[in-house]
Amino acid sequence: MQSTYRSYRAIPLVLSAAVTIDHALTFYLAGGTERILKYEYSPTLVYAVEHNLVIPYLLFTVFFYYAAGYIVLKHLRNSGIYHIGIYIILLMSITHVLG
């Protein structure tokens, strides 16, 4: 069994979970769609809220983040910079949760 560090399939799940947590906290802390429409800086999220497309938007976003992380790590897995890809994905995950 390989370690989680070497699993280019598992690491992007962390990023997808972080994006899910980020959006869940955004909606929970906003208290309503009015505040999201007024204060949110993401034009795609604002568009999704205005047109009642939040669920498809979130599903696509989570899938996109997973696919992007998976593809990047798969191509870097046998290179000397694989660890840098891991660090970038984990940094993006932390940024989504804390930002």
Image: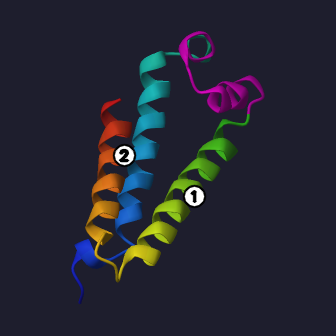
Distance from label 2 to label 1 (Cα)?
A: 15 Å
Q: Nearer the viewer, residue 44 or 27?
A: 44
Indicate whether 32 appears above or below 92. Answer: above
Label 2 element class:
helix
Tell me which secondary structure the magenta stretch mostly adopts. Answer: helix
> Disc 1 residue type?
Phe
On whether residue 65 falls in the magenta region, the answer is: no
Task: Identify the magenta region.
Answer: 36-52
Residue 84 in the image, given as x and y percentages of width and height: 29, 61
| First-in-chain label (2 vs 1) | 1
On whether residue 45 falls in the magenta region, the answer is: yes
Q: Is residue 77 left or right of residue 16?
A: left
Indicate whether 63 appears above or below 70. Answer: above
Q: Which residue is mark 1?
A: 63
Between disc 2 and disc 1, the foreground one is 2
Label 1 element class:
helix
Circles 2 and 1 in contact, beta carbons < 8 Å: no
Q: Is residue 71 left or right of residue 15?
A: right
> Disc 2 residue type?
Met
Q: Which residue is mark 2?
A: 92
* Quadrant position of residue 34: top right
Local crowd size for mark 1, using a 10 Å CA cut-off: few (<14), some (14–19), many (≥20): some
Q: Residue furthest bottom?
A: 1
